[in-house]
Amino acid sequence: MCGICGEIRFDGTSPSALTQTRMMEALAPRGPDGSGLVIHDNAALAHRRLRIIDLSERARQPMVDAELGLTVAFNGCIYNYPELRAELEAKGYRFFSHGDTEVILKAWHAWGKDCVGRFHGMFAFVIHERDTGRVVMARDRFGIKPLYLAETPGSLRFASSLPALLKGGGIDTSIDRHALHHYLSFHAVVPPPRTILNGVRKLPPATIRVIEPDGRKADTVYWSPPYERDPALAELSADEWRDRVLEALRRAVRRRMVADVPVGVLLSGGVDSSMIVGLLAEEGQHGLMTFSVGFEEANGEKGDEFVYSDLIARHFDTDHHKIFVLSDRLMEALPGVFAAMSEPMVSYDNVGFYLLAQEVSKHIKVVQSGQGADEVFGGYHWYPPLAASEDVAADYARVFFDRSHETMKAHVNPEWLPDDDPSFALVAGHLSRAGADTPVDAALRLDSQVMLVDDPVKRVDNMTMAWGLEARVPFLDHELVELAARIPPEEKLRDNGKGVLKDAARLVVPDAVIDRPKGYFPVPQLKYVDGPYLDMVRDALTSRAARERGIFREDYLARLFADPSGHITPLQGSELWQAGLLELWMQTHGI
């Protein structure tokens, strides 16, 4: 829901309205239904609106509460805002609108930093206090909604996307070598506060930051669930865990129906999205709109899973929409995909979500999606081998990292390589933190709090919001995740992964969807870079801009060009696509 941007100045001058306008224009696809700009002394807050809750002008943003002396720019949705509003009204607060934005303002005034712990939802917001000059920034527990930051001389700028910050000008666009290492090693995951650019950072998830008028700042991390067993739950049976998961997911899906417009579902045909459809059918949703996408096959690899999405659509009698993407349309879409990326993201899913969102946005503005279930309930292939691990960091890196630090020396020119191994150090540090009972618990915590944020979640937000479509993710309901973190790993790893979730699914959807082989979002033309895709990538990596950058060794690129399908990462990604995507993203955004 929307895009936000703005600037805080610490040098006594006022922010430039022209700069804010340029950033707002870059965010227009995220909020095609309206715009607004408010400048208060040292702070500018701007907003692009996607009307979903309270469609009236009373809910326009930035929202100013003159009585409280507060102004907010907010991106996201607070699903429990009606309950919070009632609680605030009981405390004497008066409301002039009917949506969730004003609830944030009153909640901050009533509860201060504790307000974010009361929010069920996805959000990134910035509040300016008239009387103190302070600015408050916050991001939801999983970073579902982004917030990028850039320090410039005398100011701090913020925006919902990195390209929007670049449009404001004056940003250091040199490449962060540690972030580059993460991109090439940690499967394109660049955890906060870093981005690929030295001049742009991002607020970490589950963080609230208070910035004083002189620029001093203080962060509070307000959520980090323990991945430990609760003795009070030690005697629960598999059926009891199943029932608790099903009830928590049912509640999560119900919460995400709050809207003043229709809500649909992105239906891949896997267990996760199928469960969402089934639970919405339980809630009495008739004529629910569902959407699936498929691609041409390549190298004998099928490019769609329509057989399963069709099965679910028929079973629950949904208003189902399928799009089949021919190769020429895929090629035509790629420039838009690169432009929509706030950061370079190597997953083939990007173009799938981009084209799916384009079609969905012709029908509705809000969908539910199944992201997060694998990271929360142990669905990936690398979790079972970790159950007996004696060196979880090394074992995790072996199955997840695209290349080791040593291998990278043969791929990247020396000036771009840090002396140490920052990617392994980051992962090892996270995996060794207290609060996880087993190696599998530690890996699930890493994946749900770090990898998920800057890969699947960012991918879905970027590609759906490129078309003014809001995606909601019930598997990242924080109460559901807190419950899952308490479940013994063996209950998750059963049945080839997600055992306890599959148990719950059997009470909702047909077994054929549950017992199928695990699928991914297949885009085989990009996995086996060939034909026009090979030409595009080769042109980018041999261009003058790429040669002057000099990131990759020429002998390494020559090997990739000679045999693209022969260089596949442990996670079944193309090394050539990874290198080419990075350069194509930088050229798209004028880096």
Image: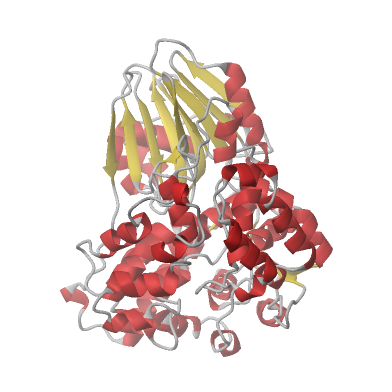
Question: At 63% from the left edge and 26% from the top edge, which residue is drawn?
Answer: 22
Say if residue 358 shows up in the picture: no
Please state the horizontal and vertical placement of residue 503, each as a whole percent of the image: 44, 85
Question: At 64% from the left edge and 56% from the top edge, which residue is drawn?
Answer: 580
Extreme residue toward the top, this view? 12
- On the image, which quarter does residue 532 sit in? bottom right
Between residues 136 and 396, which one lies in front from this camera angle?
A: 396
- On the image, which quarter does residue 166 sit in? top right
Between residues 276 and 412, which one lies in front from this camera angle?
A: 412
Residue 209, placed above or below residue 66? below
Extreme residue toward the front, this view? 555
Please state the horizontal and vertical placement of residue 243, each as a whole percent of the image: 38, 79
Side of 329 where 399 appears, left or right: left
Say if residue 371 shows up in the picture: yes
Color encoding of the figure: secondary structure
Side of 482 where 152 appears, left or right: right
Between residues 157 and 87, which one lies in front from this camera angle?
A: 157
Residue 446, placed above or below residue 16? below
Residue 86, placed above or below residue 322? above
Side of 223 where 570 appears, left or right: right
Please state the horizontal and vertical placement of residue 543, each as a whole percent of the image: 70, 47
Please state the horizontal and vertical placement of residue 424, each as a whole percent of the image: 34, 61
Question: At 26% from the left edge and 59% from the top edge, which residue is drawn?
Answer: 429
Please count the marks in the image.
0
Q: Locate the N terminus by quadrant.
A: top right
Question: At 61% from the left edge and 42% from the top edge, which residue is drawn?
Answer: 548
